[in-house]
Image: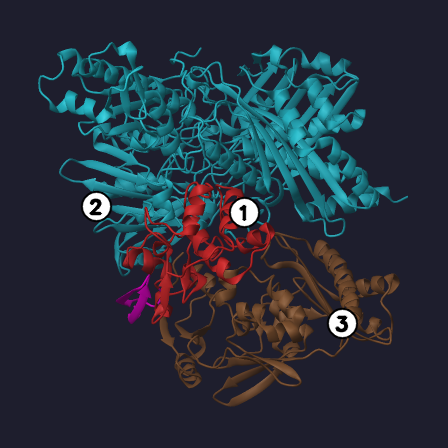
Chain colours: A cyan, B brown, C red
Amino acid sequence: MNDAPEIHARPKIVGARIKRSEDPRLLTGVGAYTDDRQVMRVLHVAFRRSDQSHARIRAVDCAAARMAPGIVAVFTADDLSDLVKPLVATSRMANYYATPILPLARGKVRYVGEPVVGIVADSRYHAEDALELIAIDYEPLPIVIDPEQAVRPGAPLLHDEAGTNVIVSREFKRGDPEAAFASAPVHIKGRFRMHRKSPVAIEPRACIAEYEPGRDALTLHSATQVPGIIRDALSSALDIPGHRIRVVSPDVGGGFGGKGSLYPEEIFVCAVARHLRRPVKWTGDRLEDFAASSQGFDEIVDAELALDNDGRILALQADVIGDVGAYSIYPWTAALEPVQVVSFLPGPYRVQNYRGRVQAVATSKAPTGPYRGVGRPISAFVMERLMDMAAAKLGIDAKDIRLRNLIADDELPYKVASGIVWDKSGFQECLHKACAAIGYDALRAKQKQARAAGRWVGIGIACYAELTGIGSRISVAPGMPINTGTETAIVRIDSTGAITATFGIASHGQGLETTLAQVVAEHLGARFEDIRVLQGDSSGVAGGTGTYASRSMVLAGGAATLAAGKVREKVLNAASHLLEASATDLVAEDGKISVAGTDRSITFRDVARAVYAEMGRLPPDARGELAATETYDPVFGTTSSATHIAVVEIDPETYEVRVERFAVAEDCGRLVNPLIVDGQVHGGVAQGVGAALYEEVVYDAQGQITTASLVDYLVPSACEIPPMQVMHLESYSPTTLGGFRGLGEGGTIGAPAAIANAVADALAPLGIEINELPATPERLFRLIEAARARAKP
Amino acid sequence: MKPPAFDYIAAGSIAMAFEALAQAGDDAKIIAGGQSLVPMLNFRMLRPSVLVDINRIAGLDVIEATSEAIHVGALTRHYQLETSPLIARHLPVLSCAMTHVAHLAIRNRGTIGGSLAHADPAAELPMMALLLDAELRIASTSGERTVAARDFLLGALTVDLAAGEIITGIVLPKLPPHTGWGFEEVARRHGDFALAAVAATVTVSDGAIEQARIALTGVGATALRAHQAEGLLIGRALEADLTHRAIDAVRDAIGPETDLHASSDYRRHLAGVLTGRALAAAWRRAHESAT
Amino acid sequence: MSKTCEISVTVNGTTHRAAVEPRLLLSDFLRHTLGLTGTHVGCEHGVCGACTVLVDGDSARACLMFAVQADGRSIETIESLGRIGQMNALQESFHEHHALQCGFCTPGMLMTATDLLRKYPLASDDDIRKGLSGNLCRCTGYEHIVRAIRAVVGKTQERP
């Protein structure tokens, strides 16, 4: 239900390819990232991190470290126990065990990289020197590293009090899947494995806590996506009311979810800054990032699809084991990713009978947190592989089997087995559009020729749907300690006529300073360049969370629409007195208010002066502050969807995979800025290519992280990413203000599935299925050798 | 990832470098390009008490040709090698190899002396030194010695270079006329260390191979020459059956490691594939070359 | 404790004299001693390329050099390319083509591109991609960066 006034004038700001206002400072080297912040007398932190996978901490000897040059203080968990209250990612879900988050490990360490001792020094160099002087006596405990072993009853426990390593379990059911499977003529089954990923933002995590003794107040600058969440959590952990604790995300160098949770280091610097009454700074390095930043995508899925002989889906079932690492991440809980794997598995398809079961198991790895796509990349990978496998078995084209099963326009809104509702989205249209763009039929013909010439060429399609812009009725996990369903906008014109729009979201590359300014300018009637957007600061709005889950344009954009509209009314009200015309005859556009059909006009600045500076110029009811605060809740959420098509060629001797072409047709609703939309798709697809072919976090059998640096964890470079074609469908959401839908995660949801299908298609003549990602040359070598051995008479 | 403390001496001459090294004893490290050394320092995998910086020693970055060979100063940067007209003319296989070495910023600083002294098992330059039968000139306070590349590379990251010794130059004999070359590499990403790489030259006379060289990297503790395989090619024309036998001989000759990125089996497989491709390219080029 | 060394380094045309510990990385010297925070640190092991600067005109990783090694040398950082309102053609092209999102890899991309444009003809987009292979970006998928550089290939690049 769209409550905003329709904009009948030709839209010239929302929808325009406006160059970003973030760019000038970032292009000229005067951005303000967390580590750039220069603070007098700042102290530097280094952490001694566990080199044990699972061990009891028997003793910690910091005596030598304390005496080392430049060392100001050394802290263990005991030293902080009076300074910090533990936080817990709570949830009302049944079958959930919440693990507390502490700034330093107490009693036990549960993953290599867990912080045990914090050193505070005059320089990072000195702090690192002193780390080597700390002696920790560990009593090794049994290794808990393999999720399939950790899941078994009787497995050694990572959290003794939980009594199990399975800290979440959930089931979704709809219809009668057992009966449907029993009677279905066609069954397709597979075991699918997506391996663990690290978000790897190019800026490592960093935070600086500054303490004001005069007010017992703290300001934390942190490379975080969620300043509002951090502020509320720290307020609780440190027992400081919100008006004395402020969290600021300055310029942030990427997040992708890895900066979307509360971290021990943030708690540590705040507690220590307050205790030492000096500013305290921690800038993580890349080793720390790999060992201790949240990870994602680590899922094992046993899935089965039942179809009729025409390839129509009758039923779907899946059992999922999600490896959630050593702790339940705050605030999302360990349920975040694994539950979404099952709740989104049916995708944009008509699935009337479904059973999806998931167990989230704790193992000795860095905690699983949000990573772009959150569970849906795995859902799409599994479902799209099943669809291709079914197509191959039935001799149906991959495009056709999808057309038969994709929910059609006239079936929407459609309720998925998990209760999620697809409101309106161009599922079939995206598939047609992507196929047309890539020239699907011609490609299939070319593939035939290439195959005849001995080349291994593959085409892979992936269709997905996601829920974005979610409101208060949809929760990642019931009883989660935060509210993700609303955002607030404060629009204000000051006495100089300058316009500020303040939000609780926290842009970290998405260009929200630009796109939100576009929305405000349009609804206010102001010029884009006159809007200043303030965001990423917990003190800006009373309550907010940040930027994650493809929500900021829907929620903050919706709030901006409402607030700007209210301020526009006030401006017109004041202007009506100044222009001696009825407000209904006034038009606000381009920063001016004019009387329709005449050349009489005044500027926003004129109005501001009259309201604020000229006594007696306006009657009392037109003199109120030119400001409005509005909170928007979309209530449910809206559907975004896309079709991705990948074309790959595999060297038939070296097994190197090259993604030659990639096309995306996506429906993300109304585009605010096409440049930025394209950029988001490109970036997501690139991470999807990484997930499909290159990236894997590897822990060895002793729980040591072997992909410890950028040498071994392979982030794709420009040579590994194909050129991309992106097409847009703008089906305005019927359920969100402005018709916006969320965008941002689709690339990682569709791309791994499309590439997996393309690789499988290329290898189809060898009878090889691709059910494990990343599909590295080594894995392909093994699959091909095995296939050839099977083929030998 | 800050390095541990060390003392630093910027040697303005070779004599100064020797003096600094002598004073520091076994605990000194020479820094040239630093592209391999500094990451190890930042990871605290190495803790030298002294770094002796030889970047300012003049005259060690010259590439010149004699009638027999190309002489390359040890401080020659990878980018210089990559773009040298002398190398392009006389040793085009090396020009090609240089385009696979890391990335421009690394090539601007990294040196041939440094790369050979570091001897990474998957680096291109040690393989090229073996392919071209290079000789290293090494100086110390005791004078100068010359070592063949094949005797210099002892093991993974291990070379015949004593404390107090500095590589000053590399002599690369020119290739005989009617020599074609091939270079093939598989790496996970562009510029990464090789999973396996093969460089080959083939000198053809009267339709038969007179001389053949096959060098590999990434498939053992050091780069190596596949002498058995080379021997099979002498006196014959390259055709499918001979190529397969050479490939088998190469596969038999190597003992690749298994690591995070590739198994021994896959590396062995690649070595064979790339040998076939490199030999085919070398054979083709041998027939194309005018002199 | 090691002795400090006196160095004289020219950065973006200005000569700075300082006494530094030998182990101080050039990246830290630029960022924290000189306050030029435009050069970014992403890995400190020479892989991500965010710290790329020009040393005597050639691109190099600032995290793989020590400040002492820059004695007598001329360093150019992103701050030398242009100012807000007066960006150079390459920066303008990045702006026009939306070749940055979070901006963290951008300084390294610009310095690398500057060196590539001087050293290579960059005849194909594939050549541009190869030239950029030592600069990791997690946001853009490289598409717009390649277009931005393509748009300035062949145009005169004036040395600052």
Q: Which mark is residue B289?
A: 3
Q: Which residues are magenta?
A: C1-23
Q: Pointer 1: what residue?
A: A715
> In this orientation, which residue lies closer to the viewer: A693 or C37?
C37
> In this orientation, which residue lies closer to the viewer: A335 or A461?
A461
> In this orientation, which residue lies closer to the viewer: A524 or A304?
A524
Query: Helix, strand, or loop for circle 1?
Result: loop
Q: Pointer 2: what residue?
A: A276
Q: How many marks?
A: 3
In the picture, the quarter occupied by the N terminus of chain C is bottom left
Residue C43, can we see it? no
Query: Helix, strand, or loop for circle 2?
Result: helix
Q: Badge 3 local density, few (<14 within 10 Å), some, or many (20+)?
A: few
Residue A81, can we see it? yes
Q: Nearer the viewer, mark 3 or mark 2?
A: 3
Q: Nearer the viewer, mark 1 or mark 3?
A: 3
